[in-house]
């Protein structure tokens, strides 16, 4: 009988949990600022009256808005717990919207290391953020999966170049050691109440009776410039220089500066909500990245979004939409699906 392999030091830390010390207040201008960064001009993100007409008490945060506070909250996890890597590559993101987040929400944010898997010699690491309102109800869950990359996989000069290029109070490299004292914090037991976002209003989406499996969404082209990348980096707090420094991007093995994965996901969410009419009707958005969108200094980048209805559930009046994204002839979304409620 073969003994089961021992868990790695990082695998032994699965379940490590902490809660942010302070609550996160969702400000009206923060909502607009983020909507501008992902080029999402749906009226509910900008106009209080437009949001009220769809039954919302304030401006609605774009679906991927939680990625910004999530990135700040995850910093401790990647500096103190998930250590031993020189950088991380984002591979997959899952947004679960239990109810839309609106301006004025005050959120408690939990962070948990939920999975470590070794695939093809690489560590796939998943960190989960949960966002809970002042009534104790979970309103949003965000699952971020990255690949841990060591110096063996990248140019030796990348680490030094990154440190020279970064803001002085940001340590992107996540330097640390698995050695030393470690006390595991575990999520406390207790009932988790999930907010029911669609129970008190009718979604502003098309009628379920008017859509069919196979229906296609109108194709949409979005342009990105280096200025858009710099703006998103500031708004979202993602200061990785591969998104704005050509030399560092090439040291990292990239052909040029690339768009943030989260930015392309935000663009994709806006593409669907422009068609559906109601960003708050989405209950789940999952994206697996397959290739980056390269953004040259002179030409920028064009991203083509398309979509179709994959399935419909008459019992819940929901549907699953497959979202495709291409740039320079390459698929940048390996698989992207969005589940939403229809009216």
Image (cartoon, grey):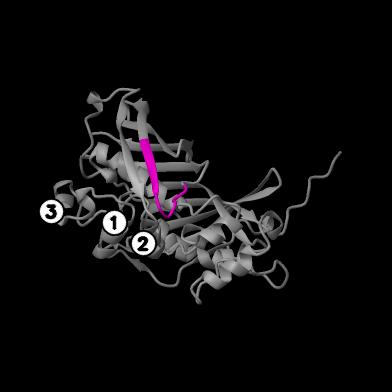
Inter-mark Cα distance, 2 to 3: 27 Å
N-terminal of the pair, mark 2 or mark 1, is: 1
Q: Answer whether labels 2 and 1 touch (C-beta < 8 Å).
A: yes
User: Residue 185 lies in magenta, yes or no?
Assistant: no
User: Does residue 33 lie above or below 170 as drawn?
Assistant: above
Q: Which residue is mark 3?
A: 49
Q: Report how many numbered discs are placed on residues in the image.
A: 3
- Dot 1 falls on a residue whose secondary structure is helix
Question: Quick check: can you spot residue 332?
Answer: yes
N-terminal of the pair, mark 2 or mark 3, is: 3
- Dot 3 falls on a residue whose secondary structure is helix
Inter-mark Cα distance, 3 to 1: 19 Å
Return the residue nearer the eye: 265 or 212: 265
Question: Quick check: can you spot residue 96?
Answer: no
Q: Residues within 10 Å of mark 3 (few under 14, many from 20)?
A: some
Res 36 label: 1
Query: What span is colored magenta in the figure?
Result: 294-305
Measured as percent of width and height from the top left, residue 45 is found at 24, 53
Which quadrant of the view contains residue 85? bottom right
Q: Which residue is mark 2?
A: 231
Inter-mark Cα distance, 2 to 1: 9 Å
């Amino acid at each position: 009988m073969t003994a089961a392999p021992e868990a790695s030091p990082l695998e032994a830390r699965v379940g490590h949990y902490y809660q942010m010390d302070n609550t996160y207040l969702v400000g009206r201008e923060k909502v607009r600022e983020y909507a501008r960064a992902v080029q999402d001009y749906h009226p509910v993100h900008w106009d209080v009256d437009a949001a009220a007409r769809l039954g919302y008490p304030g401006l609605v945060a774009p679906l991927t808005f939680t990625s910004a506070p999530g990135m700040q909250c995850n910093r401790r996890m990647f500096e103190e717990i998930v250590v031993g890597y020189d950088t991380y590559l984002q591979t997959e993101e899952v947004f679960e919207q239990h109810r839309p987040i609106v301006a004025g929400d005050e959120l408690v944010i939990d962070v948990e290391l939920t999975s470590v898997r070794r695939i093809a010699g690489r560590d796939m690491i998943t960190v989960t953020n949960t966002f809970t309102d002042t009534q104790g109800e979970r309103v949003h869950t965000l699952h971020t999966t990255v690949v841990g990359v060591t110096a063996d996989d990248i140019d030796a000069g990348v680490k030094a170049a990154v440190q020279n290029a970064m803001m002085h109070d940001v340590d992107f490299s996540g330097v640390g050691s698995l050695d030393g004292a470690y006390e595991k914090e575990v999520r406390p037991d207790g009932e988790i109440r999930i907010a029911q976002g669609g129970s008190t209003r009718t979604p502003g989406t098309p009628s379920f009776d008017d859509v069919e499996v196979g229906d296609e969404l109108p194709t949409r082209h979005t342009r990105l410039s280096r200025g858009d990348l710099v703006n998103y980096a500031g708004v979202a707090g993602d200061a990785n220089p591969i998104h704005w420094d050509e030399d560092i991007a090439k040291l990292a093995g990239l052909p040029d500066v690339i768009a943030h994965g989260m930015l392309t996901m935000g663009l994709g969410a806006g593409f669907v909500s422009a068609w559906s009419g109601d960003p708050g009707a989405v209950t789940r958005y999952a994206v697996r990245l397959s290739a980056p969108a390269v953004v040259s200094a002179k030409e920028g980048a064009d991203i083509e979004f398309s979509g179709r209805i994959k399935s419909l559930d008459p019992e819940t009046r929901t549907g699953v939409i497959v979202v495709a994204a291409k740039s320079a002839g390459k698929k940048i979304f390996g698989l992207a699906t969005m589940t939403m409620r229809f009216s």
